[in-house]
Image (cartoon, rainbow, N blue to C red):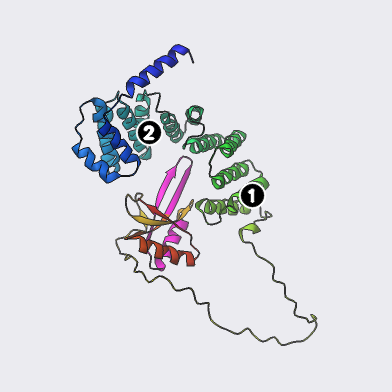
Amino acid sequence: MPKLLIILILLSSIHLFGQVGKDFSDLEKLYKSGQLSQVKSSILTLKPRRDEEKALVGYYSALLQKTKTAALAEFQAVADGYPKTSYGQLAMLEAAKIHILEREIPRAQTLLRSISSADIIERFYWMAVSFYWLEDYSAAIANAENYLRFNPSDALAESALHLVADSYIAQRKYQSATSSLDKIKKLPEQDLQYYYYRQGYVQEMMGDYGKATRAYRAGYELDKYSQAAFNIEERIFALRSRAPSLDISFLYPYAPLELDLGIAVSDSVQIAPPEVTGPPIPDPLPKIAMPEITSSMPIKLLFKPISGFYLQTGRFSVESNAERLVRNIRAMQIPATYYEEEKPGNKSWVVLAGPFENQKQTDAAKTVLFQSEINSFIVQY
C-alpha cells in the first residue's frame, strides 16, 4: 500500500475517533464491565454537547434496547445523525448485523460500505457473512481473508476461517477447505471438536469415508454429550448408510463379559434364575418446585429468548430430534422449548429447559436432567 495512502488513513482515523469527556468515557467502561443499570441511569443524566458525545449516548442507549426493532431504530438514528463520528460508524456496524440476522442483506451491505473508519476491521467479517448468504462465495472468501489479514488471532478469526472453509465447500473446492480448516489449529484458542466435525465433513464430501470416520471419532471422543457430538453422530449414521462396513462401534463402547462357570459345555445343569430385586433406587432429588408447564408454552419458540435463566440441553441439526428431547424433558415435569438458529453454513435447533425463576430451580432441574443422562449448562439471556 502506498505510504501516502497509509498516512491519509491514519489521519482520517485520528479525526474520526475524537475525544469525549470523562463522564462519557466512564459510560463506556460501565457497559464493558456489565453494570447495565448504571449505564441506563447515566444516560438519563448526561448532557452531551459535541456530536461524538451525542453519538456515544445514542449508541449505548441502542445497546440497552430489549428488542431488535427498537435497537435497529436507535442504531440507524445514530448512523444517520452522526455518520462521521466513531460511534456513528459503530452504529452502522451494529445495524448491519441486525439486518444480516433478518436476512436483509442489501441493507446490511449498504451500511457496511458506508463505514470509512480504518479502525473498524470487523466490517470485513460481516461483509463476508453477507456475501456468503448471497451465495457469492468468492467475495465471501476475499472479505474474510481481508479480515484475517488484519486480525489473524482475533475473537472472530475462528469463525472467519470456518466461513472461508464453508465457502470452499459450497464451491466443491475441498482441498482448499481442508487448508483453511487446518489454520484453525494454529489459533491460540479453538473449538477442536467443531474443527474435527467440519474436517470429517470435508473428507466425507471427498469420498474418503475412512478419514471422515477418523476425524468424526476424534471430535466425538472429546466430549460425547456436546452439541457438536450430536451433529457428528448424525453424520456418522449417514456415512454408515452409504458404507455399511464402516466400524462405528466407538459410538457404543462395551467390554465383553467374561465368566468362568467351571463347567463343560456338555454338562447338564440347572441354573437358578437371578433374584429379582427391582430397579435401583435413584439418589433423592432436590425437593424444589418447578415452573408450571402451561398450555400456552410453545414447543418451538419463534425467536431466541431475550431474558431469563435457562439450561441448554442440546443442539441438533435435525429439528425432529430437538422436538423429541423437548417432549422428553417435559415428561419430567420440567418446562422446555427449542428455537431455530442459523449461522453461515449451519442451521441448528437449540433445546432449552426453563425459564427458571431462580438459581435453586435451575440447579434442581440440572440435577434431575443429569440423573436422566441429559447434560446441560446454564445460559442467561
**Tag 1: residue type?**
Thr
| Count of all numbered marks drawn on residues in the image | 2
**Location of residue 16 (image quadrant):** top left
**Tag 2: residue type?**
Ile
The answer to whether residue 171 is magenta is: no
Q: Is residue 80 above or below residue 133?
A: above
Q: Callout 1: helix, strand or loop?
A: helix
What span is in magenta? 321-350
Q: Residues within 10 Å of mark 2 (few under 14, many from 20)?
A: many
**Location of residue 378 (image quadrant):** bottom left
Between discs 1 and 2, the one toward the N terminus: 2
**Location of residue 360 (image quadrant):** bottom left
Q: Which residue is mark 2?
A: 105
Asked whether the residues under the numbered discs 1 and 2 touch, taking CB atoms below 8 Å apart as contact, a structural biologist would say no
State the residue at coordinates (59%, 49%). 219
Residue 373 in view in this figure: yes
Q: Is residue 178 above or below residue 376?
A: above
Q: Is residue 333 above or below residue 251?
A: below
Q: Which mark is residue 146?
A: none
Horizontal and vertical percent position of residue 317: 49, 50
> Is 7 or 261 nearer to us in this picture?
7
What is the C-alpha distance between the residues marked 1 and 2? 37 Å
Residue 66 in view in this figure: no
State the residue at coordinates (56%, 38%). 184
Q: Callout 2: helix, strand or loop?
A: helix
The answer to whether residue 339 is magenta is: yes
Horizontal and vertical percent position of residue 19: 30, 25
Q: Which residue is mark 1?
A: 213
Horizontal and vertical percent position of residue 265: 79, 80
